[in-house]
Image: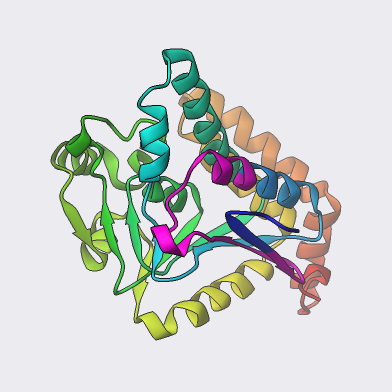
Amino acid sequence: MNYETIIFSKDGKIARVFFNRPDVHNSFNSTMIRELDDAFEKVKADKSIRVVVLSGKGKSFCAGADIKWLREIIDYSYEQNLEESIQLAEVLHKIYLLPKATIAMVNGAAIGGGNGFLSACDISVASEEAKFGLSEVKIGLVPAAISPYVFRRIGEGKAREYFLTGKRISAQKALEIGLVNEVVPHKELEKTVNEIANLLLSSGPEAIAACKELIHKVSEMSLDEVKEYTARMIANLRISEEGQEGMTSYLEKRKPKWTK
């Protein structure tokens, strides 16, 4: 699949999506947003894909909005700005709710909107050389579209600190505040991500999708609502084909069919 600003590839059950504008540190523009939307729509529709790895080509993961794009949108009307902002919000939402496991392989700098992409993924693994920053306030803006996903990772206290100051975050500090799940030496980054991807492939694909739905919905439900919702979910999974195979393989001390 040929794209102008990203690279999409598929290797068996694993899809890889790379930001591919290394000359501008993989900063995004309207073209990249549209192409990311298209790529993740393809991933969602392809039942053979079970894990997605999101990363950047070159030395950076994603440096946020492209400066040239900012020069264009500075003259946009409110309606034009709203349309562009909704497109970015839609892509982040699509990644976050994708019923398949997603891993952000943070190979370098993640600035501004780049943090939204890694936060929308299920698991984020960063190179120890990576740097992070939520610096929108420095140019009179705010991390609006990415805030729901970053907030879910670092919580209100840290969001206040880093959203308001815009100060840089080292890889180790990103790990401490929960922005990323793991930090590894740069030369071990791809190996570590591949190991996690293979670990995810050993889990039931329907169970992965149900887990993501569970995490998303339970946090917004009352305790009374949760009782009914969770009971119905586990009952449905137990009688499903995948659930039956999983329990049977466990009792028979063999690997389930989806691992083959």
Q: Is residue 39 above or below residue 252?
A: above
Residue occupying the point 28% across, 41% down: 155
> At which x and y percent is residue 170?
21, 64
> If the image is split into quadrants, where does the N terminus sit?
bottom right
The residue positioned farthest toward the bottom in the image shown? 187
Its colouring scheme is rainbow
User: Which range of residues does the magenta coloring cover?
Assistant: 9-36
State left or right for residue 110 relative to residue 243.
Answer: left
Identify the residue at image location x=52%, y=42%.
Answer: 215
Which quarter of the figure has residue 49?
Answer: bottom right
The spot of residue 242 in percent (x, y) is 81, 57
| Rendered view: 223 above or below 30 | above
Residue 244 percent coordinates (x, y): 82, 57
Q: Which is more toward the observer, 92 or 236? A: 92
Q: What residue is at 42 percent from the left and 21 percent from the top?
A: 76
Q: Nearer the viewer, residue 100 or 68?
A: 68
